Image: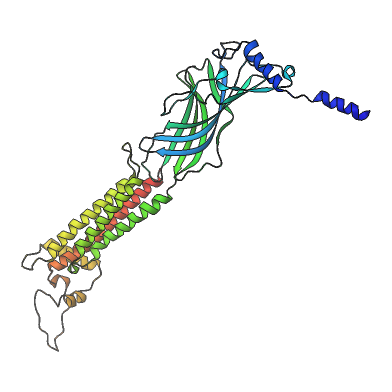
Amino acid sequence: MMAACLLLLLCDCVSAQTGKDVSNLYDYLFSTLNYNKEIRPAIYQNISTQVEVDLLLSGLHHIDETRQQMTSVGVLTVRWKDEFLTWDPSLFGGANFIDVPQGKIWKPDLQVRNGFADFSQMGGDFMFLKIYHTGEVVWFLHKVFHTKCKMNVTFFPFDRQNCSLQIISWSNDVSSVNITGGGDGFRIDADLHHGHWKISTYSFSAFMDLNDSVISFSITLDRKPKIYILNILIPVCFLVVLSLLTFLLPNDCGEKVSYSITVLLSMSIFLTVVASMLPTNSDSISYLEIYIIAVLSVGVLIIVLSTASLRLHYRTDKRKIPDWVQRLTRLSWTLRCQHIDGYNAQYNYRTKTREHFDDKQERKEPQKSDIVVRWTDVTSALDFYMFWLFLTAITALSLAVTWLYFSQ
């Protein structure tokens, strides 16, 4: 007897809607109540409909620096209250929600404000909306977004870009539809990964612009520089070192100009290969591109100076060397810490006057001013000065570019 009473009590507490209950509910909402989807679902039309929008960003497809466009994928969750779609669940077998096609009821005409694509209806006729007995409507939208994104590639490949996705109710102003952020706000899918970009920060904000209600989902993108460091920066540094080594080659080797031309051609071919990796954007030019152009200019100057050095190297001693050139040449000997004895031995005691000493006469130590400077000495000094000049210039340029990158 006790078991039978408990069974009856449980049966009274449990209710389950049937297909007939859902059909009756459907007829009640759209036939009996004579629902009109063209009318905004507010009993008092002077009160705006509050629309909550959440975004789950699930993927970044492409970031186009040339077109300044971001292609992303996400799921929008839109909620609002339809005051014309309410019912008592006890009258319909306990049915507290119903799924209807999105074209069956009123919905906010949401559009991407900063989009690239043509305006079209969000969602599709195959999508359903969930309506609760309180009138709350939930609309899930999966969409590919093509949005504008102003790119500044000045600090490439260590640049940071700020992009946003702005949602607006196109046909209704804030007095009719007020868009706000929902409880979830803006979320990033844990599986979202991109080979070239990393999302560092993200946020959302709702605001009013020219009497229109707008919600903006913003992300900050940091470029992953590893591939550019390995494929651009390090090879460029190697080519710079090879270019500077031109001044360490002796003029008598016969391969000085051909070596510098080979290095320049290697640099040109390398730049052709990496041109596709550099962002093509005329609105802003990266410091890296300026640095590469400077390095290429250095390579051209090295070829010009090497040619001029060879021209001077094979001049005859009948051509007089200007005094200031001789002084600079002797100064290079001092800067290189080369001894006079070494030079006398190297040049077979090329002094202005020849002195004869006997065994008893003390030999006088020659001075640098006594040594005859030849054109071969001039070209050696020229290589010495140019090596340190270009090394200093390249080092200063590299440090300046590095400082600019770290100062961003």
Q: Quadrant of residue 67?
A: top left
Q: Quick check: 144 left or right of 350?
A: right
Q: Residue furthest right?
A: 1
Colour style of the rendered protein structure: rainbow
Residue at 83% of width from left, 27% of height from top?
Answer: 10
In the rendered image of this protein, does residue 34 appear above or below residue 197? above
Q: Quadrant of residue 319?
A: bottom left
Residue at 16% of width from left, 68% of height from top?
Answer: 377
Where is residue 90? Give x, y as percent. 75, 18
Give the camera-side residue of 158 and 113: 113
In the rendered image of this protein, does residue 152 appear above or below residue 17? below
Q: Quick check: 154 left or right of 2?
A: left
Residue at 27% of width from left, 62% of height from top?
Answer: 245
Q: Quick check: 374 left or right of 169?
A: left
In the rendered image of this protein, does residue 80 appear above or below residue 293? above
Q: Residue furthest left?
A: 318
Where is residue 106? Give x, y as percent. 56, 17
Where is residue 65? Give x, y as percent. 37, 38
Give the camera-side residue of 403 and 79: 79
Quick one: quadrant of the N terminus?
Answer: top right
Where is residue 169? Give x, y as percent. 49, 21
Figure label count: 0
In the rendered image of this protein, does residue 329 appear above or below residue 100? below
Q: Residue furthest front?
A: 20
Give the camera-side residue of 18 and 400: 18
